[in-house]
Structures are given as C-alpha cells and as structure tokens.
Image: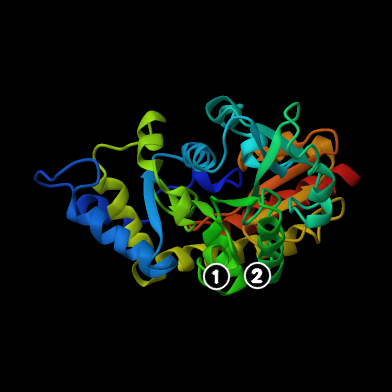
C-alpha cells in the first residue's frame, strides 16, 4: 500500500522540511484562529509573494477554497463559467453549486483551457430576469489535463473578461507546477495577469493539509472571513497551516518540489511513448501525463503501480508524478509497460 504509484500527487507524503516545520510549532500554547505569530509572518510572506494589497484566508482543503472564493465573487442568481473538466464541475460532488447557489456553466475544451472564443456564445441573457447571469470565469492553472495557460493567454483572457464585467477565479491547486514550468513567480501567473481571486494549493506539492484563498481584488475581501466561518473552513489551530506555508515559501521549496515533479512527468511521457500501443493525448507541461493504452493492459499495470482511468470509453489513463517520484519509479513502471506490451503482441 505504501508503494509509490502515479494516481495522484495527493497520494504523496509530506516533504521532510514541511514535516519539520509542523514539529517546530508543536509546543506550548498560542492564540488560535490565526492570532499567532506564525500566521502573521505567513500572511506577510503572501504579501511579499503576491503584492501588498493581497488578502489571504487559510482553509482546510481545495474544495473549501473554491467554494469560499466563488461565494465571495457571485450571488446565487449568477453563474460561474468553467471548463467541462474543471475540478469544481467534476470532482467536488456538486458542492460549489450547493453552497454558492450559483449555476455552473461548463464548456467543452479540448485541452482543459478556456478562451474568449469558447466563452462568448454563453454570454447571453444579460439583464433578463428569466436567465442566470454570467459573473465569474473559473480557470485552472495548471489545468486538469496537465496543460498550461501562457502568461499572454492569461492576461488576454482576464482583460477580455473584465471588459465584459466578469470576474476571474483561478483554481491553483497545482499553481506551483505551472509557475515552475513557466519559469515565473506565482504572482506572474495569477495576480499580475489579472486574476481576481486565487485558490492556492499546497497539499499536492508537499504539504500535509491546508490551502489558501488569496484575494487580489480588494473589493471582494469584505465579508470573506465570515464566509469562511460559515463554510466550516476556519481552522482553530491555524499555526499548523501557517507553519507549512512558511516552509513552502522559504527558499522557494514549492518551486524545487514542482520542478522535480514536472521533470519526472516529462521523463515518464518520453519513456512511455516509446512503447508500441501507447499514445500520449495531451501536451505534458506540468506533472500530469494522459495516454491512451489498450484496455486489457490497465488492470495488470494497476496491480503494481496504481493510477486512475480518466476516460473509460477511450481507454485514456492519467499518470501523475509528485515531488517524491523517483527515476526508479518511472523505470520500473515503463519496464512493466514494455513487458505487458510485448506479451500482448505475442
């Protein structure tokens, strides 16, 4: 059960430096709910990373971060536009719609990315009381398909959205991987591009738990602390989230972890694509590899290296790498892949 596989970067453990940070603050008493010195230091780190106007609210998990962000951005009669593969649309059990009261308008995208051209046809019914009113565009960086918005694409999309009175939310569960791949700061691929509110993840990149709602549009931060409390996302022992983010940002640990995970994905894609019968379906730009393989191979592979089937109809699978993926993991997996392919052709 403890063998490293390729199912999810959520399956990885905690980075040793982050575990040490947790242990370092695990002594004595300190004020709860964010009144401690560790949290105040961490909030200053966020301002340093993203800009002095940034307001940050720590939460337990990614779904909670997305719900709180969207509640701050839209009213129940308004709609959130997202890609059909978006986490808020596919993997959050309807929680965003239930908790915000907003309708999700999911748009088909070949690579998980939204463009003005894809969104424009859905901007209808403005001002008509019989129709839900589009208000927020929610994008994911890196996307659920492992692809990236370039900085130019992000800036263009945010500018286009704002010109139409729309707000932009970014699900940044894997923002670290995106920034590392683009060789830029996290701010450059979020705040500086025009994003209004960011859900920033750390769990997929070495943290034990804890995410952050990071607000760049100061008009949206009022009342957010109350939304967080009502959403059951206010952590009493806040220092244990803050301590992790403090380590996460120190010496850009987030970047080192993400660069490694991305590098491992590139190696996995390169080696797997050499195997007859394997077809890589998406650009490998972050730490995810999507491939179509013969259906009869899947269960045998999963017995030794667990992963998820992405699309059963196409026999498309998803392989995710993490900060602790090793060369040996990939070599062992691709060796097994070659062996199964060879047997299948005999």
Task: Count up the numbered dots.
Answer: 2
Q: Nearer the viewer, residue 48 or 346?
A: 48
Q: Could you tell me if residue 185 is visible in this image?
A: yes
> Where 214 sits versus 155, above or below?
above
How many C-alpha atoms fall within 10 Å of the one at disc 1: few (<14), some, or many (≥20)? some
Labelled disc at residue 126: none
Q: Quadrant of the C terminus?
A: top right
- 297 or 342: nearer the eye? 297
Identify the residue at the far bottom of this view.
183
Q: Are marks 1 and 2 in contact (CB under 8 Å)?
A: yes
Residue at the image position 58 percent from the left and 55 percent from the top: 329
Judge from the rendering whether residue 11 lies leftward or rightward of residue 112; answer left or right.
left
Give x and y (percent) for residue 154.
67, 64
Q: CA distance from mark 1 to mark 2?
A: 7 Å
Please tell me in which quadrant of the rendered image residue 20 appears: bottom left
The residue pinned by badge 2 equals 151
Tell me what residue is drawn at x 80 percent, y 42 percent.
122
Q: Image check: 239 left or right of 245?
A: left
Residue 188 shows which numbered tag? Answer: 1
Determine the residue positioned at 75% across, 26% down: 130
Image quadrant of residue 113? bottom right
Residue 275 position by quadrant: bottom right
Q: Residue at x 76, y 33 (%)?
A: 128
């Amino acid at each position: 059960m403890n063998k490293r596989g390729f199912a999810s970067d959520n399956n990885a453990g905690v980075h040793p430096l982050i575990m040490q940070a947790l242990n370092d603050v695990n002594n004595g008493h300190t004020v709860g709910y964010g009144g401690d010195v560790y949290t105040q230091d961490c909030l200053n780190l966020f301002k340093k990373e993203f800009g002095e106007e940034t307001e940050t609210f720590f939460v337990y998990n990614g779904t909670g971060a997305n719900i709180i962000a969207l509640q701050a951005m839209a009213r129940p009669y308004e709609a959130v536009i997202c890609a059909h593969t978006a986490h808020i649309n596919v993997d959050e059990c309807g929680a965003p719609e239930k908790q915000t009261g907003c309708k999700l308008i999911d748009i088909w995208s070949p690579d998980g990315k939204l463009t003005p051209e894809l969104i424009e046809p859905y901007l209808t019914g403005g001002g008509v009381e019989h129709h839900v009113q589009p208000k927020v565009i929610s994008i994911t960086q890196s996307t659920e398909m492992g692809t990236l918005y370039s900085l130019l694409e992000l800036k263009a999309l945010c500018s286009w959205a704002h010109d139409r009175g729309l707000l932009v939310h970014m699900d940044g569960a894997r923002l670290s991987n995106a920034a590392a791949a683009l060789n830029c700061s996290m701010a450059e691929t979020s705040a500086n591009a025009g994003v209004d509110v960011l859900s920033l993840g750390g769990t997929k990149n070495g943290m034990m738990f804890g995410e952050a709602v990071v607000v760049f549009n100061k008009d949206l931060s009022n009342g957010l602390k109350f939304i967080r409390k009502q959403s059951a996302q206010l952590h009493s022992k806040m220092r244990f989230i803050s301590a992790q983010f403090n380590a996460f940002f120190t010496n850009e640990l987030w970047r080192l972890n993400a660069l490694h995970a991305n590098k491992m994905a590139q190696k996995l894609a390169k080696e797997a694509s050499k195997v007859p019968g394997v077809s890589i379906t998406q650009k490998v730009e972050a730490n995810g590899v999507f491939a179509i393989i013969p259906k009869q191979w899947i269960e045998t592979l999963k017995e030794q290296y667990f992963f998820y089937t992405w699309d059963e109809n196409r026999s498309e699978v998803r392989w995710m790498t993490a900060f602790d993926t090793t060369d040996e993991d990939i070599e062992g997996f691709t060796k097994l892949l070659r062996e199964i392919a060879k047997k299948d052709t005999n």
